[in-house]
Amino acid sequence: MCRIFGSFAVAATGAELATVSARQRHGGPDERGVMTGRGWSLGCDRLAVTDPAGGAQPFTLPTAPGVVAVLNGEIYNHRELRRRLEARGHRFPDRCDGSLLPALYTEFGTAFADELDGMFAVAVLDLRGPLPQLVMAVDGMGMKPLHYHQGERGAVRFASEIPALLAFDGVPAEPREEALDTVLSTKTPFGTETALAGIRVLPPGSVAVARGAEGLRMLRCGPRAVAPDAGPAPSAADVLEALRGEVHRLAEVDVPLCALTSGGLDSGLVTALAAEHVRPLHTFHLGYRGRWPEAEHTYARAVARRVRTRHHEVCVDPAELPSLLTRTVRHLGQPNADPIAVSTYALFRAVREAGFTAALTGDGADELFGGYDRVRTALAAPAGTDWTAAYVDALAAAPRLVREWLYTPEYRAFVAERGSAADRIAAELRASGTDRAGTLQTFETRRRLPAYHLRRVDHLSMAWAVEARMPFCQPGVVGLARRLPTGPRTGKRALYEAGRGLLPAPVLRRPKQPFTLPLSAMLAADGPLLWTVRELLAPARLRRGGQLRADRVQALFARHAERPSQQDALTLWALAVHELWTDVVQGLRVSADLAA
């Protein structure tokens, strides 16, 4: 697990590369390595997880001359691949998973990523031909993002994190004008675009190639197509055994490992299965000091007692939240209006401070197994009705009517002319040629999950040099989830059935609740976040921005003070996150100018 960066078809100075590296060193504090040549550079800041004593990056091999590679992530089938490559004459200096990449590329070329089982973002430089070639690939779920900028004359610059990418000369830090509407419509940008003009992210399962000065082109824009299994639908026992195998496999690690236990079904299942394999297993749960609604600590304790873990309750002082919010937005590099982000950042901080480098999580289960209310509501809508409008509104931080009410006439006209993110998603869903259940699962797992969820987990775990391992996102579990029958009342029935006998009955009976902030209470009168959000949304500031009606934002504050609601609190939070993010971008731009 590392942070990687590089450039192609453009020169990069040593000082420039040092600044890029420094901006994401938090994710790779153990070792820094950089190689450069005429018109190219590859670099890595390493978090040593597999074979900590080996694994120096960038990777080169005597048996694969002219090939250089860097890796962010983990290759879980590296032992099997190493045996196959050794049979072809390759020799390796250590047991690190990434050490085999030059040999794998030499044998399979640009199809090398098809051989990888894991979570990864890889960049390979092939110097063997008359023109150098850069190949970049990411895993099929998008667990390890790779951001890039395409410049003039084929120049490509890339990095694991946006703030690091912005440290390259020639990469602009220009917020998109539609970013505010995107944040309110979907909480964060989906797909390959980011909130910054000119900066994109490789889609899940993609392979991209740049050769000479030709620029970047996509060889593949999604996961490799696999023929569907024509067998019977899997049972709950099948799902449980697949999940057990992945949890046990991912629990094999050369550094201290723990599990994150929110008190819900998904993390509870991962915790229970990990406790079968790891003794003693340490578990972590986060809450906020004081009495807040929707606290989950009693459920997390019940899981920990049931499976006999060494349980850690992390208690954050709400007075720290303004500082945590600023640091969270800075690490994400673009706005994400889900309040869970701040809690996630604080939880991984506690994990690292307790001495753990890897953590098992329950991420991805809701998207794969249809656990969200919006999915069940959409599936229950009568045939022939337009279910997309309600579904898309459920993705939003602010409903459409509220958004339009808050916008200035000029910004409302801009959004209407361009089309909002919500409009584009609704059109995409309506145009899908698959059945409704298939359309929803494809959108949830291939569009929303990577951008909204996995990118956040990656950035905020690596902010504290912790590797988050996600058993639900492994191919064996993903494949079973896609074969399960779907319906408005099906939901996560297979997982609930799998949890019987493993988890306490109260955890299985409780209604679904996200791991997040008690936002409505914290933005109420005298709440710990109220004045921070008010300052970010001060009328003078909003009038300068020209996108929001300051009087209506103040009316929203007044309405929430009189009748606190989760919806109004989320709208105010999303607006504040966007404003704070614009400050962060301005700061990155200024620091880059000073460095230049």
Image: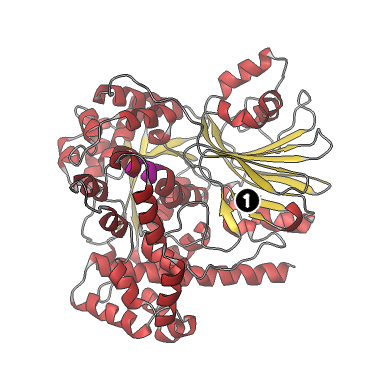
Residue 549 coordinates in the image, percent (x, y) = 37, 82
* 485 with respect to 550 (left or right): left
Quarter of the image where one finds residue 411: bottom left
Q: Say if 218 sits above or below 157 in the image.
A: above
Q: Which residue is mark 1?
A: 159
Instruction: Give the residue displayed 21% in from the left and 71% down from the top.
Output: 564
Q: Say if 450 sits above or below 149 in the image.
A: above
* 207 with respect to 313 (left or right): right
Residue 11 coordinates in the image, percent (x, y) = 80, 54
Q: Give yes or no for residue 381 being in the magenta stretch.
A: no
Quarter of the image where one finds residue 288: bottom left
Q: Say if 30 sits above or below 157 in the image.
A: above
- Quarter of the image containing the N terminus? top right
Q: Around disc 1, counting alpha carbons within 10 Å, would you say few (fewer than 14), some (14 to 19), or many (20 or more)?
A: many
Instruction: Give the residue displayed 23% in from the left and 78% down from the top.
Output: 559
Q: Which residues are magenta?
A: 440-445
Which amino acid type corresponds to the residue marked 1 in the rendered image?
Ala
Instruction: Give the residue displayed 20% in from the left and 46% down from the top.
Output: 383
Q: Say if 216 sits above or below 500 in the image.
A: below
Residue 266 coordinates in the image, percent (x, y) = 30, 38
